[in-house]
Image (spheres, helix red, strand yellow):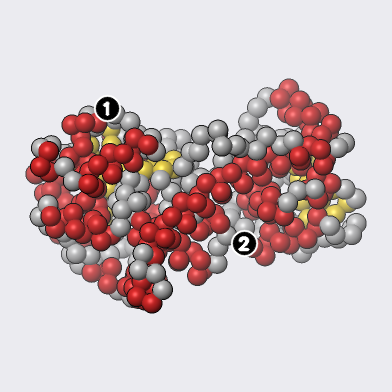
Amino acid sequence: MSRANWTPLHARLHRTLRSRHLLEKHQRLLVAVSGGQDSLCLVQLLLDLQPKWEWQLGIAHCDHRWRSDSQANADFVARLAQRWKVPFYCHTAEQPLLNEAAARQWRYQALAAIAQTHNYPYIATGHTASDRAETLLYNLIRGSGADGLQALTWQRPLHVGTQSYAPLLVRPLLEVTRTETAQFCQERQLQVWEDTTNLDLKYARNRIRQELLPYIQTHFNSQVELTLAQTAELLQAEVEYLERAADELRQLAVDWEDTGIRGQGDKEAREQRGTEAEGQRNNPKSKIQNLKFPNSRTPVCSTGDTPARNWLLPTPDSLIKIDRRILQTAHIALQRRVMRQILQQTLRCSPNFEQIEKLMALIAAPNGTQTDPFPGGAIATVDKDWIWLK
């Protein structure tokens, strides 16, 4: 692009891509474009940077069939792609999606399917610092720990259903506000498709965007969007650190009682792990102190996912053994994360606060104490130094 068209926003994005290692040169990159100001800003910036990075860009549009003008919206994006000489892909929902969560899940499934079919290892979306601030507030109001408050992350593998192929979802504009994307579109004379559903206050996120954040900006902090986005950035690194530490702690404290164990690793590896764990339990406090926690030299990945669960998965007849002696020496923050990891595998869904605390209470409970059933019927029972979950 000409030097005259190079703006501070181009320079910021270029630095962000390099410093955060979000994208690589010579890659195929699928850009999700709704037609709104954020996605148009993103795709124009990427088109402008394309000569430097030598990407092969594609544009994807997801038609939720929310509005009567949704087909016209899709046609609008298709014309833009044609004008830019960029491949265009459109997925249309078979039935109208009226629920935000269902629409989000379908949208990611559609994007992953397009990426898989057309060999795009990267998917870029136009989420901004404003979206990050709104998501943090939304999750805080609903009730969330640090994992939910870290809000949108810079990148994460887009695992959908049972698909083995997982393109990398990247969000390059998380340091850019919605005000800045609007200004960029105006300066570049980009025609924006106005989505009328963004004005509908029956959606909680719209009410946060149109009422709550402006109120906070007026009466408390004019830079609240950037402040909350920075908070989410700090929380992301802390969540990753704690989750890795909890993963190590869980490997020390948890065993399966099942002859039909299935999971990663061969029989010899499982036996070796069991031998090591038994030795570690003889001096749990010392072993907790010697956990190999991530340090400042450990590269921080920004996937937003919890670390890979390289641990054995129970069969339906498995008994889960949790060593209370090891957990009793750990900080409560790590105790909660370990219990959440266990329940995520046991319940096959995200456990809530009450369920985690119910299992937490058994760490110091008298012998013979048991919980009422968890969803699915599992019950946890204290037997001397162990918590048994079946």
Residue occupying the point 31% across, 53% down: 176
Name the foreground residue: 227 vs 269. Answer: 227
Name the foreground residue: 165 vs 147. Answer: 147
Q: Is residue 86 left or right of residue 94?
A: left
Could you say where residue 336 lies in the image, as x and y percent from the top left?
68, 54
Could you say where residue 77 lies in the image, as x and y percent from the top left?
16, 51
Residue occupying the point 49% across, 64% down: 139
Q: Is residue 16 left or right of residue 281?
A: left
Could you say where residue 65 lies in the image, as x and y percent from the top left?
26, 61
Q: Type of residue at label 1? A: His
Rendered image: mark on residue 154: none
Image quarter for residue 3?
top left
Q: Type of residue at label 2? A: Asn
Mark 1 secondary-structure assignment? loop
Crowding around mark 1 (Cα neighbors within 10 Å: few <14, some 14 to 19, many 20+) is few
Q: Which residue is mark 1?
A: 26
Image quarter for residue 209?
bottom left
Residue occupying the point 56% across, 37% down: 296
Mark 1 vs mark 2: which is more N-terminal? Answer: 1
Could you say where residue 219 lies in the image, as x and y percent from the top left?
38, 77
How many marks do you count on the picture? 2
Crowding around mark 2 (Cα neighbors within 10 Å: few <14, some 14 to 19, many 20+) is few
Mark 2 secondary-structure assignment? loop
Q: Residue furthest top?
A: 268
Rendered image: mark on residue 352: 2
**Mark 1 or mark 2, whichever is nearer to me:** 1
Residue occupying the point 20% across, 51% down: 40
